Image: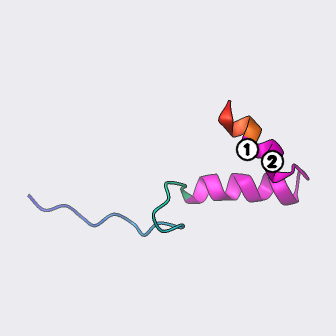
Amino acid sequence: MVQAPAPARLIEGGIPTKATVAQVRVSKYADHLLLYRQARIYAR
C-alpha cells in the first residue's frame, strides 16, 4: 500500500486549514471582528 503525502500545512505544527485561516482573516478585516471576540466564538 502506498499513500500520497499529506499537503503542506499553512502553519507548521498547527491544525488550521486554508479555509479556517481565510475565515479568520475575513472576519477580522472585512467584518471588523476583533481577534479576542473571534476566539470567544470559536471556543463555544
Query: Is 19 covered by the magenta stretch?
Result: yes
Q: Which residues are magenta?
A: 18-39
Q: Position of residue 9 (x, y in %)?
A: 47, 66
Q: Residue furthest right?
A: 32
| Residue under the image location 91 percent in, 53 percent down | 32
Task: Give the residue at x 87% y 49%.
Answer: 33
Res. 42 image quadrant:
top right
Residue identifier under label 1: 39
Q: Give the residue number, with chain letter if any, for mark 2.
A: 36
**Image location of residue 43, percent across then percent down:** 67, 35
Magenta span has 1? no
Quarter of the figure that contains the C terminus? top right
Residue 10, above or below 25: below
Give x and y (percent) for residue 12.
48, 68
Residue 1 in the figure: left or right of residue 36? left
Label 1: state its secondary structure: helix
Using the image as rendered, state which of residue 12 and residue 19 is in the foreground.
12
